[in-house]
Image (tube, grey):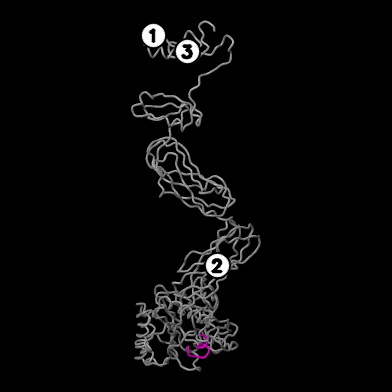
Amino acid sequence: MKRSYIKKHFLLLLFGCLLLATNHIYSQSVGINTVNPSVLTELDIKNIVNGTDTIPKGIMIPRITEAQRNSILVTQTDTLTANSLLIYNTDEGCYNYYSRTDNEWRSLCGTPGKAVFSLNCDSVKVHGTYIVYTETTSANYISLYVDVAKKGIWTITAIPKPTSNGYSFVGQGIFTETGKQWINLPAQGTPQKVKEDLIEISGSGSTDLNALCYTRIFVQPRIAEYTINCSTVSVEGIYRKGVPLNSSNVIKLMVNVSKPGSYYISTPVVKGISFSTVGPQLEFTTPGYRMVILTGKGTPTVNSDFPIEIRANTASGNNTCNVTIPITLPAMTFAVIGGAGTGNWYSWNGAVRSAALTGGSSFGPSGKVKMAQPLVKLWDTSNAGTATNHLNNGFNGKYPDIVLYSGYETNSTPASATALSAALIDYINKGGCIMYAADDNSKTYVDLVMSGVFGTPNISSSIGNGTPNTDDQLYMINHDLNDPIINGPFGYLGGKYWGEDNVTANSMIIDELPPHSVQICSANNSVGHKDISPLSSIVWYNDRKNFAYIGDTTGANNNQADNRSFPACYTNNGFPLAKQYGYVGDPALRQFVYNSALEMNIIAYLIKKAAVSGINPH
């Protein structure tokens, strides 16, 4: 042993500490491996730089885990003496000391202590879509509120329980403020199974005794990539207001699959019904074209056709289509005011027109206009007095849904015509639907109806048949793809012609239409009526009053080759036909006329109005 050096460090340290503890008279420092310890320290330990031991050495502070550190009980009375207590935290890899000021262990590495907070389980929200074998992204995370009682380090994890599914959530950081704070836990990993996971959320500093929250995440199959072919969409089945859908109510469509995977195609709920693919797990297993069937459910709440949007979960290609649900209208009735019997060409009692209404090819379960059954005639009469009585008092307690009035074949006196006009006004104002075909030179009664229904008297006038030899005038139908009459179920008629067969008398036109009215044919034309204002109308309708007007009661037959007698033409089973007609004095001016199609579009419009806002509830 060399002089001034003590090889046994522990003995010297113990001896020096004993001296300090028992005799405070001595104020000099204790040194290990030195006889000249620093006067600034109580203990000065130096490496041996001369002699036989040349390996540099240090001092070993107690090395313990964080759990062992936390087991050191520091009571309230110990905080003063424990202030600066030093250990080496093997979990953290850093020296820790006890701070009396903070009343906790602090790290010499600059890391703050652990935060104290509680979890708000009611605020938990899951974000993003979770798909098997698809790595999570920044869109996948869990958010929730925490209430921070003490600032510091925090860690919160969210893990599928009881077994892992290849992904989890973790968030960590430092709370620099106390109080309620919104945090996000980013996802990491890749889901491995299609299943519903119970996610357990736990926090490192929660003050709750049961510091756990739970939420659920459904891991979906891989989503296919495919395109809907909207041109192939078809609606099948019968749809009626108040009648629940069944297995026959489906939408069929073709899709083109480019990448196999799961799929789901559906519609929102519209007017009480919706459609969707049905099955526990729907999947396209191979690429290519295939049909998909959407099953309907619910009960329609309306009596009119309506659009519905088809939506697909594909992320590529076309993923939406629009289709119209065709509502089958309820059973409905009509009445005819005009000539009775099959020989009456001008009223709706004529053979071909009557077949058009009741034959089923135009209106009925398989007709152009879908109805629960063909139209049923409630009554017909050519007597103005009888018609007035039925309109005022009902017929066997019932009122017709629509009235087809042919002024030319209605027998009346001035008094009965006036009474009938009043009855028609009352019927219309109660919601009744009417096609009013005016008689020749009937301005008095036309103005009476206009005044009673629209409050606009004295707006009608007569129009002759133009220059000599140009009777049977033609009028172009206006263009409007969105108009329910011009573009109705019996065809688009814009740019085509309607013809009148008034040879010697005058047809009734309206000089200025009432509000909410739509002109179908202007009274102006290029042959004979050039001086008539284009604003004057010979065919028009009013949407608010369920009222359609024709300025001349035209005749009908089923002879398509007849270009002279009547402009309206129907097949034997009552389907509308076009025929050449017009301008007796100059056959070169003839055109194909579409009177019958226009009449049927008007009736289809009135039937639909009657089902929605007519005089009878449906």
Q: Nearer the viewer, residue 21 or 531?
A: 21
Mark found first going from the N terminus, 3 or 2:
3
Judge depth for marks 3 and 1 and give the one in front: 3
Residues packed near mark 3 inside 10 Å, few (<14), some (14 to 19) or many (20 plus): some
Q: Magenta residues, as a range? A: 348-356
Q: Distance between the Cα atoms at labels 3 and 1?
A: 16 Å
> Is mark 3 in CB contact (under 8 Å) with mark 2?
no
Mark found first going from the N terminus, 3 or 1:
3
Query: Where is the C terminus found, in terms of image quarters?
Result: bottom left
Q: Callout 3: helix, strand or loop?
A: helix
Q: Callout 1: helix, strand or loop?
A: loop
Q: Is residue 352 magenta?
A: yes
Residue 195, percent from left and from top: 54, 55
Judge depth for marks 1 and 2 and give the one in front: 1
**Which residue is label 3 attached to?**
12
**Which residue is label 1 attached to?**
26
- The image quarter in which residue 440 lies: bottom left
Q: Is residue 576 magenta?
A: no
* Mark carried by residue 492: none
**Which residue is label 2 attached to?**
294
Could you tell me the amino acid type at mark 3?
Answer: Leu
